[in-house]
Image: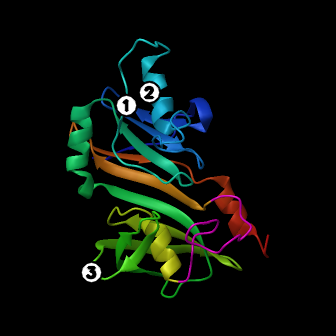
Amino acid sequence: MAKTKQSTRKHLPRGVEMLYEDNDIVVVDKPAGLLTVGTPTEKINTAHAVLTDYIRKGSSKSRKRVFTVHRLDQWTSGVLVFAKSQDIKDRLQERWKDTEKKYVAVVHGRLTPQEGVITSYLAENKAFVVYSTTAAKGKLAQTGYKVLREAAQFSLLEIALLTGRKNQIRVQMADKGHPVVGDRKYGKNKDGYRRLALHSKSISFKHPVSGERLTVEAPVPAYFKELMAQKGKP
């Protein structure tokens, strides 16, 4: 029987919220704007750094750290899983294709049909921009979507990530003519919205030790409801 875990409302530094923790894994609700891991120019303000500090419990001499299982884009919020050892990380990644990942997004316009699967092949150029290409040059990307609600200018979607390519949802929705609201990289330039309306709602997977099915959920940000309540341009 699947076990569902929702927020414990335990807040960590930099807006991170604990969703689930045991001896092997830690799952958080990452806020929009926070990097998953460090970059050449930013190594401290990351979810990885926050959680490493957390499990070290303030001990600067501790060698404990968390291990990155997967990533979310900086401006995507929601469920993010870390392992507490290299072995657990390896076990989770070996089965990652069987993990169910659901997102919610607010996109421009109204979709036809209102439910389906988007299939394309994606590649990345030297400027780190992902784009659609041919099967011979790209990797298969599949995204399932369903319209939950429509507003004057937006649609609220539930999205099932069937493959895990970089920027997959953002690129495919833009290709379809319905870019994610606030997407400055693949969407409408300067659409006037303050953040990317993409949220990792839930992740469901087999626990790497117990084998029990675990589903972890993160509440949808109020920002999404605010967007759907709008009747005109910002």
What's the mark number on residue 226? none
Percent of width and height locating residue 160:
40, 66
Labels 2 and 1: the sequence-earlier one: 2
Labels 1 and 3: the sequence-earlier one: 1
Say if the magenta span includes residue 191.
yes
Secondary element type, mark 2: helix
Are circles 2 and 1 on residues that touch, CB within 8 Å? Answer: yes
In this view, the residue in front, 93 or 224, is 93
- Label 1 vs label 3: CA separation? 36 Å
Using the image, determine if residue 204 lies above or below residue 134. Answer: above
Q: Residue at x 54, y 39 (%)?
A: 42
Say if the magenta span includes residue 82.
no
Secondary element type, mark 3: loop
Percent of width and height locating residue 211:
20, 41
Percent of width and height locating residue 150:
63, 77
Residue type at mark 1: give it.
Answer: Val
Q: Residue at x 40, y 62 (%)?
A: 166
Q: Is residue 112 left or right of residue 150?
A: left
What's the mark number on residue 135? 3
What's the mark number on residue 52? 2
Residue 45 occupies which quadrant of the picture?
top right
Secondary element type, mark 1: loop
Are circles 3 and 2 on residues that touch, CB within 8 Å? Answer: no
At label 1, counting other C-alpha atoms closer than 10 Å, the crowd grade (few under 14, some 14-19, many 20 or more) is many
Bounds of the magenta segment: 177-195
Residue type at mark 2: give it.
Answer: Thr
What's the mark number on residue 66? 1
* Residue sitting farthest toward the front: 126
